[in-house]
Image: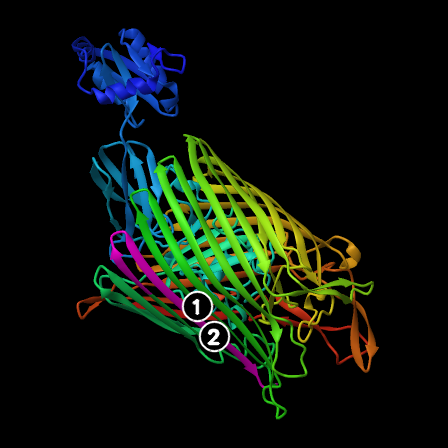
Amino acid sequence: MNKITEKNFVPLKIIVFCVFLFPKVNAFGQQSALNRKVSVHLSNLSVSQALDLMSSRYSLPLSYDPELIPEENKVDQEFVNVSIAEVLRTILAGTGLTYKTLHNEVIIVPLDKVSLSGRIVDAESGEDLIGASLYIPELRQGVASNGYGFYSLTVPPGRYEIQVSLIGYTTLKSTCSLVLNENRVFRMRKQVKELAEIQISQPDEKDSLAFLNPGKTFNWDNGRQRAYFKGESDLIKALQMENGVTALTEGSSYMFVRGGNKDQNLIILDEATVYNPSHLFGLTSVFNPDALKNIQTYTGAIPANFGGRLSSVIDVRTADGDDKQLHLKGGVSLLTARASLEGPIVKDKSSFLFAARRSLNNLLSHDLELFNLRPAYYDLNFKVNYKLSQNNRVFFSAYVGRDRVNSSNGYLNKWGNQTSTLRWNHIFGPKHFVNLSAIYSNYKNTLSINADSSQGTNRWITGIRDLTVKGDFINYPNPRNQFLYGFSSIYHLFIPGESSSAIYNNISRVRADEHALYVSHKLSAWKNFKLHYGLRMSFFNTISNERTYDLNEQFEPVIVDEGNKKAFLRFEPRLSLQYMLGGNRSVLLSYNRNYQYLQLVQNDELAFSSLESWIPSGINLLPQRSDFVSLRYKDVLLGGNYTFDLYYKKMQNQLELTDHAQLISNSFIEGELRPGFSNAYGMEFSFSKNVGNFKGDLMYAFSKVFRTINGINEGKRYPAGYNIPHVLKLNLSYQISRNFSANSFFTYSTGRPVTSPIGYYEQNGLKVPIYSDRNSSKMPDYHRLDLTIQWTPASLRAWNRNWFNTFSVGLFNVYNHRSPLFYRINQQNLQELNFDQQSFSGRTLGASYTFKF
């Protein structure tokens, strides 16, 4: 037989051209040879080995280009009295190849390809489903739907069984005869489960491209059934229960991910940045549980289409609204009451969603034990979409949230987020998809002092406002390749701090542009080897004039120049390599370089402060930089699944506030920051197993984070304030009966570092503390157990509708362990250095009720 190479006298391209130019020129003798009946056993041979055996054993003149043959395919089958043509068709099945006969030769040539594309949606509501896996078993090829529910798969013509799967939905099987390019919508139905538990998992690994996605999909329908404070389901609290995500204190919405600081997480709601995700100082977040559709988290490798943060991305999408029928749903807990309405505007073509939520007053007055607080908040979500045509769809979504906290001593703090997003989806043929977005984001914080004083109120205002235009393009040339590329352009307005009162010194507003271009490629090079690499090019430019200053020997700012501007051009490579070892075992190696041009200035480590200033990089502050390497191993152990992760992160231009830094009325706020280096490394282990009605998740994380900052701690290395070496989490679920289920969550962590006083001196009758080295002490170890029981009765039938109800009762901090939030110096006894411990709420009852009609 002949293996066609460049040295052959007749190049393969000419032969293939002749085959298709004269498809009916076939030798009669050769046809007779193909019809010859044979019996042969092909035992675990590669395609090329099987072809060689058939050629040599039966004197079959066979030619092919070795580069066309996929060596990962194996042939292991016995043939008894079948034609050689049938044997060849079996050998070539699933390879994308076929054979043609020309004169006295049998030539292996590629099949023509067709594309199957469209959307994967919820059968009941019409919602686009993100991350659903479409798979063709015969070809062993598949693809996952993108962030807008679109998929595209290019395959040889033929009749195939297609499987569509997604966690929480019944696997859909359909048979398609693909002759020409076809656009098809797959409608999936939700799966009725005996026990609904939290699952964070990647799409099915049999998909040739889906598991290249470095993110994890969080199943919120199941996640909201965890035990929460006062029964209020909350997305941020659920994420804090996951491995590698640390909350510094109870009741906080801050997340510290794999050695990263609290401002190094990009949190986005329908593509709009959320700069403060907390309500009630962090007891709940801005994400209404009734409005959520899809949550995608990236804590390791961050794709090239995301940028501007060093540690993680939390990508939250709200529901589009049911385009078939009207629904009313809502609920109440001991913290909030909420209601939402969704339904069609034009059936099967347009829909809307409106959700509202408000806190219940005065429930925190006795819980916090800090002040006589009177907190309250509300938020609103609105979304509408319209299908212009089969290939065009527009969306508009908006969010408004407001918090207000005041006390009897004249303290008043108000903050809130506003976002809106206008998106256009367009399908350019079966292999190209584009999403264009215009986005607005506004965060504002107002702190009022002496609000009840006759002298009048003094207000200190901080905030940041963004206008963004971005485009994301996806190209699916074939099942083994997927290209993503796009751009973003952001206009920032920074309000670091200002007041209308003459007694305050305003901090100058700053305007800046942040632009980015990115490209990434997902490649399934071989059966066991997957590659996802990309490059992001970012450009940051301050539009406003800046003051250049140096720090003197006392670290006081001295202006040396005014009227300057600064621009930064940075390149951010991204790389992920995955190798399948066989069975369920896999190894994933990732590398990321990220830059962050925005800095959060906040001098309170605790959750109970929302006074914060965002400032940009510029002449005096270089962008933060991170180089991150991680290695993940996945396997099966004792009938369950486990993952083992190692990571190392090196960060430059990390900022730390000086001791006793003044943030209000400080026009030289940048002079209170000191740059330096940070190193983080760690290990994470997670194990999940189901035994009958029991389902459990065991998670352990070890991590270390150190900082070296010029001018802090005498320039010596010290542990970061969020350096918590050991964290253990255990979640257990049990299905008691068809309608009752129980869930428990236990967490243990070593105490966080603090800088504690080692003595004091008296001044004007007050104790003035003398502190030790930075973060040389630590708080006591933290641990807590939460329990909840849920009852979901059978649905009721009223007005030709089903009424669904869920009741939940639980205990937060079951054994009433009082973990200290902080210690405060007791000024009553000036002879001794005594501290008063301030703790969060102890054992707390939780209760909630949710409904859908």
Q: Looking at the image, do the residues carrying marks 1 and 2 touch, with CB atoms under 8 Å apart?
A: no
Instruction: Look at the picture and state if 196 lies above or below 511.
Output: above
Q: CA distance from mark 1 to mark 2?
A: 21 Å
Q: Give the label, 1 or 2, closer to the camera.
A: 2
The answer to whether residue 133 is seen in the rendering is no
Magenta stretch prevailing secondary structure: strand
Q: Amino acid at mark 1?
A: Gly
**112 lies above or below 280:** above
Residue 510 horizontal/vertical position (percent): 60, 67
The amino acid at mark 2 is Arg
Question: What is the crowding at mark 2: few (fewer than 14 residues within 10 Å), some, or many (at least 20)?
Answer: some
Nearest to the observer: residue 345 or residue 690: 345
Where residue 454 appears, as percent x and y from the top left, is: 61, 93
- x 55%, y 74%: residue: 445
Few, some or many residues within 10 Å of mark 1 (<14, 14–19, 20+): many
In the rendered image, which residue does mark 1 sit on? 231
Residue displayed at 67% across by 59% down: 619
Q: Quadrant of the C terminus?
A: bottom left
| Residue 577 % position (x, y) | 50, 36
Report the magenta residues as a range: 384-409
Q: Nearer the viewer, residue 47 or 500?
A: 500
Q: What residue sits 33% from the left and 54% below the top?
A: 425
Quarter in which the N terminus is drawn: top left
Residue 402: image tag: 2
The image quarter containing residue 828 is bottom right
Q: Is residue 94 above or below residue 193?
A: above
Q: Please say whether residue 3 is one of the residues in the magenta stretch.
A: no
Q: Is residue 386 magenta?
A: yes
User: Mark 1 or mark 2, which has the lower sequence index?
Assistant: 1
Q: Is residue 275 visible?
A: yes
Closer to the camera in the image, 671 or 512:
512
Position of 83 with respect to 787 (left or right) is left
